[in-house]
Image (cartoon, rainbow, N blue to C red):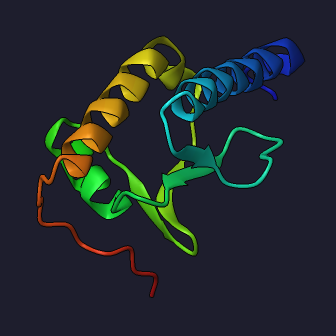
């Protein structure tokens, strides 16, 4: 707050929320993909019952996107920040392509999410 001030903080928070809204809208437009729960802030998780989301995350990693996995339910966790706002559509497009590859049988080696 000292550096950004209230207006600066509000803009960062608003940009994070705009990124989240763009991403969740795009993701839920993919057949079978759901956002888990009803996230009120910027962080959310999503998945699809018919897709191994760890394989999707592995394919995303090959494209330069870092995806955190969730275990219950199995999915991908996302915490958008202002830097995600201009690339939200790119993220959704990459997820869409990776889900299509997994559905088509791409057997990418994936590590399961683990928490120590």
Left or right: residue 45 versus residue 98 is: right
Determine if residue 65 is in view. no
Q: Is residue 66 visible?
A: yes
**x then y, percent, for residue 105:** 14, 54
Residue at the spot 37% in from the left edge and 50% down from the top edge: 67
x and y percentages locating residue 95 in the rendered image: 35, 36
Please identify the quadrant where the N terminus is shown.
top right
Residue depicted at x 70% and y 38%: 42
Name the residue nearer the viewer: 115 or 94.
94
Corner quadrant of residue 62: top left
Q: Is residue 5 left or right of residue 34?
A: right
Between residue 36 and residue 19, name the one nearer to us: 36
Q: Is the residue 2 above or below the residue 62 in the image?
A: above
Residue furthest bottom in the image: 116
Residue at (38, 73) in percent of width and height: 113
Q: Is residue 52 left or right of residue 68?
A: left
Above or below, 87 against 106 in this view is above
Q: From the viewer's side, name the closer residue of 8 and 96.
A: 96
Examine the rendered structure and indicate whether residue 43 appears above or below residue 75: above
């Amino acid at each position: 707050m000292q550096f950004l001030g209230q207006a600066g903080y509000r803009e960062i928070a608003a940009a994070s929320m705009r990124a989240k809204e763009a991403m969740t809208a795009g993701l839920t437009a993919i057949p079978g993909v759901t956002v888990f729960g009803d996230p009120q802030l910027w962080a959310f998780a999503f998945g699809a019952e018919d897709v191994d989301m760890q394989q999707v995350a592995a394919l995303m990693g090959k494209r330069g996107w870092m995806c955190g996995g969730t275990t219950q339910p199995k999915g991908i966790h996302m915490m958008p920040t202002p830097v995600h706002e201009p690339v939200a559509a790119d993220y959704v497009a990459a997820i869409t392509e990776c889900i299509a590859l997994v559905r088509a049988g791409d057997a990418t080696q994936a590590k399961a999410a683990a928490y120590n």
